[in-house]
């Protein structure tokens, strides 16, 4: 195996790859990507917290005064969530 070829392999950071393929920080595409990513993570956190407490979506909804469908939407994508609802979910 030629070690010279290995030495010439260029590596890039995740940030450099995002800059190239999604857009630089501050650009509309990058901001939209980062926002969607954060909302997906928040939805997963809500689901994990609910499961940790052994609650169904319906039970959590009853605790905070929303329908099961709203809990499902929050878990799949927290985009439509208000801060108030998110705080209620984690408080429950």
Image (cartoon, rainbow, N blue to C red):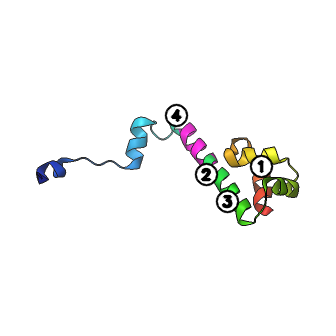
Would residue 92 be found to the left or right of residue 18 on screen? right
Q: Which residue is mark 4?
A: 29
**Of labels 1 and 2, the one closer to you:** 1
Q: What is the spatial separation of the Cα atoms under label 1 and label 4, in whole angstroms? A: 28 Å
Q: How many C-alpha atoms fall within 10 Å of the one at disc 3: few (<14), some, or many (≥20)?
A: few
Q: Position of residue 75 (x, y in %)?
A: 70, 49
Secondary structure at badge 3 equals helix
Say which residue appears at 75% left-offset and 66% top-offset: 53
How many numbered marks are there? 4
Q: Position of residue 67 (x, y in %)?
A: 85, 47
**Of labels 1 and 4, the one closer to you:** 1
Q: Which residue is mark 2?
A: 41
**Of labels 4 and 2, the one closer to you:** 2
Q: Which residue is mark 3?
A: 48
**Of labels 3 and 2, the one closer to you:** 3
88 shown above or below 37: below
Q: What is the spatial separation of the Cα atoms under label 1 and label 2, in whole angstroms? A: 15 Å
Q: Which residue is mark 1?
A: 71
């Amino acid at each position: 195996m030629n070690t010279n070829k290995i030495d010439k392999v260029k590596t890039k950071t995740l940030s450099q790859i995002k800059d190239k393929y999604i857009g630089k920080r501050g650009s509309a595409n990058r901001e939209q990507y980062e926002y969607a990513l954060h909302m997906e993570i928040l939805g997963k956190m809500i689901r994990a917290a609910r499961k940790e407490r052994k609650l169904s979506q319906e039970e959590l909804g009853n605790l905070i005064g929303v329908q099961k469908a709203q809990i499902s939407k929050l878990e799949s994508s927290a985009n439509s969530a208000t801060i108030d609802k998110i705080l209620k979910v984690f408080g429950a």
